[in-house]
Structure formats: structure tokens, C-alpha cells
Image (cartoon, rainbow, N blue to C red):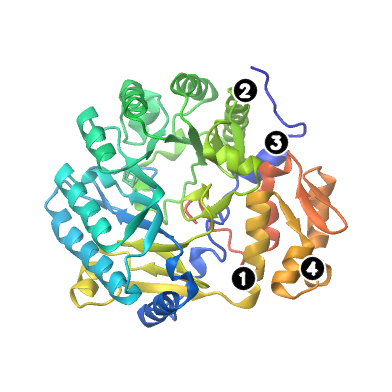
């Protein structure tokens, strides 16, 4: 198959992708949330929704299951490593209470258009516990007819029988972390899983009728080389998942404790990282994948690629989505939600989470009420990242500003990207070029007012 690598995709553009930076799964990003927004604000936002015309609009639901049986050394997620499966019981009780609180305030079985069960490891739960969780969700909410039900599964612990149970519960989308198929790399990151396990589960999932299968890869891991990564990419081609997320490993051992167990001398050099990134992009495009933006690729027939083609992509806390822009309810430790112009995030500790719910309180730790300027910049950043085009007129009409004068410094800063062939600055619009999609995050950062104020360079792929 011909490789459609955009002209100009050299090291300078690859470097823009490879540097740590905000991923804009929200704007402002979660590190701007503050404890000034808490449970009372959230309850108010929910009641406003319940009393408004938005009431009948579906929401997205994210449920975080924090438990993992063993730790992957590259991990930057909020998780609890334990082999005590009994811990799930009290956690499930708390999740049920959290659903109940939402149902009480919303006063209605709110329709869900998209469910994402993430972690941690959702399949840490037994079949019976997963059934109980889904029963509770169905008891407090109602799924729309075309709802997407996605779950992250751990190929090391999921058998065909377990997968079939997950499918019977209504899940129609799967995501699996692969990271790398090379046994040496897997040992170095303490996540050993045979390629055959992943291949077998993908085959099973296709037979069972799952609509879309996503695999995650990470480049920049210890003991990875261009040669070993080429083999991983070839093995990936044989599996041919519908979607592929390619993440950069950000080594921040001061921030993420498990990473201290990674031998730094085994990390690839910056130039080897860039070469692997370029190699992966080239390989995936040659395999026929469409570059969605940021870290995501999809086969042309996948809904995500179709949504990109039709200009209706959106971005939420799980990355790109073909779903419309929905309010999001987050359940479980560290889960983030958004109701109208307000973001909230739950406490991160399991004990504090369970205690708050035992007292009948929403376990909110922090949040953010979006200002007028936040809403405006959010719309520009999302238009750039999702549609690759910002129409000045639609922003002006929605936010009552004059685009060129409001964003004069930003437009000046964007000239450098235009000169590199990444962006067209038209009379009344900004338009990404094919090359520009690869550097979209750097252009989005130009509009990030919070970043302009306090650039700290401490972002990672989790931000
Ligand atoms: S990467 Fe996933 S499975 Fe591994 S420790 Fe982190 S949350 Fe658990």
C-alpha cells in the first residue's frame, strides 16, 4: 500500500509531538482545577441541569476502577496495586451510592450515550462484580439505543469466557494496552503478555461482534530500539486493530513512583525516540490508517475516521470521540466530570472516596467553573484539534468578540507555524494543513491562557 506521509514531516515536527505537553482532553486542563469548586457547586450544577431543557440530553458516563494486580513500571495512572480482590466489594458499594446521589439530584434516569469503564484495571472485577456494576448503572441511568459501551481490558487476565461475559453485559468496544510486543521490553516495564494472547482476544472479540477494538502502544520505553519496534509494528499490522493510540513515554520518576524502577540507562536516546515515532507514523499510514490527531489512528472504515472526514470529531477525557459534545458524569476515585460550564474531579484516595459516600456526600476534591474567556478559548482549541479549522465568524457570533483583535498575539505567534507549512491563516479562518495535524497540540498551546501565565513544562501524556 502506498505511504501517504505528508511532505515536511521531519524531525522538527516530530519533536513537537514528542515533547511533553497538555493533551487537551479538557480545556482548561485538569492541573488548573482548584479546591474552591467542591460538592456544593457540583450539586448545584446537576440540579440546574435537571431543571433545564438539557435534562433529556444524554450524558457520557466514566467509571474508574482503580485496582491492578501488578504494577507496570511506566504507569502514570491513578491506581491501587493489590491482589486482595475482596477490596472491590466496599468500592462497588461506594460506586452504587455515588450513582444513587446522582439519580436523587437529577431526579430522573438520565440517558447515557457513552459509557467508558477505565482504570486501573476494570477486569480486576470478577464476572459477578461486573454484572453487579452494570445492573447498578442500568438501575440509575438508562442507555440510549445506540449507546457506546467501552471497557479497558487486561489481556493477561481475560479469557475467551470472560470476554464473552463482558460482551453479554452489553459492551461493544474494547481497549487493550499492548505497549510493545518485545519480550525484553515487556520485562523491563514489568508487563509481560504474549502477542498470541492479544491476537487471540482480538480474534475472539471480532467473532463475538464487538464494534471497535483499540490497542495502545508506547514508544520511548526501556530496551526499545528501532529494530525491536519495527517488529512490534509488523506484529501489530497482522492484528490490525480498528483504532490505535501511540503514546510517548514521559519519564518523570519524581512524580510517578513506579517509574523509579525503570533503569534510565536502558531508555532510548532522544534521537532514537524520534526515529521510532517517525517510523511508527510511517508504518501506520502505509498500513492504511488515518491519522486522527494527537496520538490516535483509525482504519478508514472506523467511526472515528468517518467522523474526522465529516468534520464532527469531538474530544473528551478519553481522547477523540465520534460522539457529540456531551456532559460527562465521572464515578469512582479521581474521575473527572463536566456539567455545563463546570469541571469537577473526585478525590484520589479510595478510603477518602468511600468515607465521603458513606456520609452521603459527593466525593468531589476540586474543580473549575469556566470563565467566559475559558469557554471562548475552549471552543477555539477544540475546533482546531477536532475540525482542524477555526471559523472566525462562528466564534465571534457565539462569544461576541472580534477574533482578530481578541487573539492578535496568538495570531502573531501562529505565523511561525504558517511559515512551516502547518497552518493557513486565511482572512476569516485558520486551517490546518495535512502536516499541521501532526503538530496540532503545539498550535493549541498558543491559545492556552493558563499555560501562557505559568509555563512549567511539567506536562506528561496524562495531563
Ligand atoms: S498501566 Fe494500567 S494495568 Fe499497569 S499499573 Fe497502570 S493502571 Fe494498572
Q: Upstream in the sequence, badge 1 or badge 3?
A: 3
Between circles 3 and 2, the one closer to the viewer is 2
Q: Which mark is residue 84?
A: none
Image quadrant, ligand 1: top left
| Quarter of the view holding residue 364 | bottom left
State the CA–CA distance, disc 2 to disc 4: 39 Å
The quadrant of the picture occupied by the N terminus is: top right
Residue located at (73% from left, 44% from top): 436
Check disc 1 and report its element: helix, strand or loop.
Answer: helix
- Comes first in the chain, label 2 or label 4: 2
Q: Residue at x 59, y 33 (%)?
A: 277
Q: Tell me the distance, in whole angstroms, between the alpha carbons under discs 3 and 2.
A: 19 Å
Looking at the image, residue 283 sits to the left or right of residue 333; the answer is right
State the CA–CA distance, disc 4 to disc 1: 14 Å
Q: Which residue is mark 4?
A: 403
Q: Farthest residue toward the right?
A: 427
Q: Which residue is mark 3?
A: 11
Seen in the picture, residue 72 relative to 367 is either above or below; the reply is above
**CA gap, disc 1 to disc 3?**
34 Å
* Residue marked by disc 2: 286
In this rendering, which labeled residue sits more in front, label 3 or label 4?
4
Cβ–Cβ under 8 Å for marks 3 and 4: no
Q: Secondary structure at mark 3?
A: helix
Quick one: 319 or 21, which is closer to the camera?
319
Amino acid at each position: 500500500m502506498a505511504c501517504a506521509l505528508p511532505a515536511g514531516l521531519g524531525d522538527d515536527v516530530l519533536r513537537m509531538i514528542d515533547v511533553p505537553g497538555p493533551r487537551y482532553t479538557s480545556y482548561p486542563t485538569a492541573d488548573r482545577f482548584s479546591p474552591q469548586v467542591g460538592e456544593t457547586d457540583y450539586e448545584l450544577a446537576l440540579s440546574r441541569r435537571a431543571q433545564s431543557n438539557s435534562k433529556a440530553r444524554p450524558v457520557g458516563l466514566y467509571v474508574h476502577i482503580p485496582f491492578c494486580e501488578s504494577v507496570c513500571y511506566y504507569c502514570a495512572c491513578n491506581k491501587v496495586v493489590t491482589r486482595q480482590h475482596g477490596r472491590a466489594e466496599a468500592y462497588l458499594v461506594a460506586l452504587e451510592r455515588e450513582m444513587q446521589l446522582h439519580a436523587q439530584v437529577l431526579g430522573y434516569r438520565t440517558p447515557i450515550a457513552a459509557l467508558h469503564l477505565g482504570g486501573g484495571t476494570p477486569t480486576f472485577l470478577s464476572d459477578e462484580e461486573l454484572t453487579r456494576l452494570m445492573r447498578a448503572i442500568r438501575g440509575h441511568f438508562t442507555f440510549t439505543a445506540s449507546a457506546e459501551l467501552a471497557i479497558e481490558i487486561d489481556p493477561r487476565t481475560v479469557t475467551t469466557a470472560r470476554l464473552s461475559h463482558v460482551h453479554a453485559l452489553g459492551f461493544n468496544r474494547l481497549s487493550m494496552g499492548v505497549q510493545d510486543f518485545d519480550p525484553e521490553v515487556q520485562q523491563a516495564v514489568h508487563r509481560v503478555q504474549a502477542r498470541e494472547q492479544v491476537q487471540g482476544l482480538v480474534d475472539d472479540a471480532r467473532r463475538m461482534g464487538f464494534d471497535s477494538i483499540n490497542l495502545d502502544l508506547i514508544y520511548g520505553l526501556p530496551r526499545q530500539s528501532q529494530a525491536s519496534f519495527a517488529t512490534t509494528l509488523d506484529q501489530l499490522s497482522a492484528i490490525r486493530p480498528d483504532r490505535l493510540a501511540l503514546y510517548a513515554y514521559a519519564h518523570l520518576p519524581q512524580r510517578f513512583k513506579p517509574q523509579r524502577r525503570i533503569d534510565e540507562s536502558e531508555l532510548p536516546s532522544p534521537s532514537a525516540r524520534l526515529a521510532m515515532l517517525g517510523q511508527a507514523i510511517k508504518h501506520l499510514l502505509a498500513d492504511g490508517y488515518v491519522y486522527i490527531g494527537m496520538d490516535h489512528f483509525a482504519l478508514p472504515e472506523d467511526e472515528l475516521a468517518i467522523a474526522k472526514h465529516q468534520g464532527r470529531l469531538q474530544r473528551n477525557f478519553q481522547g477523540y470521540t465520534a460522539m457529540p459534545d456531551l456532559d460527562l458524569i465521572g464515578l469512582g476515585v479521581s474521575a473527572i466530570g463536566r456539567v455545563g460550564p463546570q469541571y469537577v474531579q473526585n478525590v484520589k484516595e479510595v478510603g477518602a472516596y468511600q468515607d465521603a459516600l458513606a456520609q452521603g456526600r459527593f466525593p468531589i476534591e476540586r474543580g473549575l467553573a469556566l470563565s467566559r474567556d475559558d469557554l471562548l478559548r475552549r471552543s477555539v482549541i477544540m475546533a482546531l484539534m477536532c475540525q482542524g479549522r477555526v471559523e472566525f465568524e462562528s466564534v465571534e457570533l457565539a462569544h461576541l468578540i472580534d477574533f482578530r483583535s481578541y487573539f492578535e498575539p496568538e495570531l502573531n505567534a501562529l505565523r511561525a507555524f504558517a511559515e512551516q507549512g502547518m497552518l493557513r491563516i486565511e482572512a476569516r479562518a485558520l486551517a490546518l494543513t495535512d502536516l499541521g495535524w501532526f503538530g496540532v497540540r503545539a498550535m493549541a498551546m498558543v491559545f492556552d491562557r493558563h499555560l501562557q501565565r505559568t509555563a512549567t513544562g511539567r506536562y506528561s501524556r496524562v495531563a
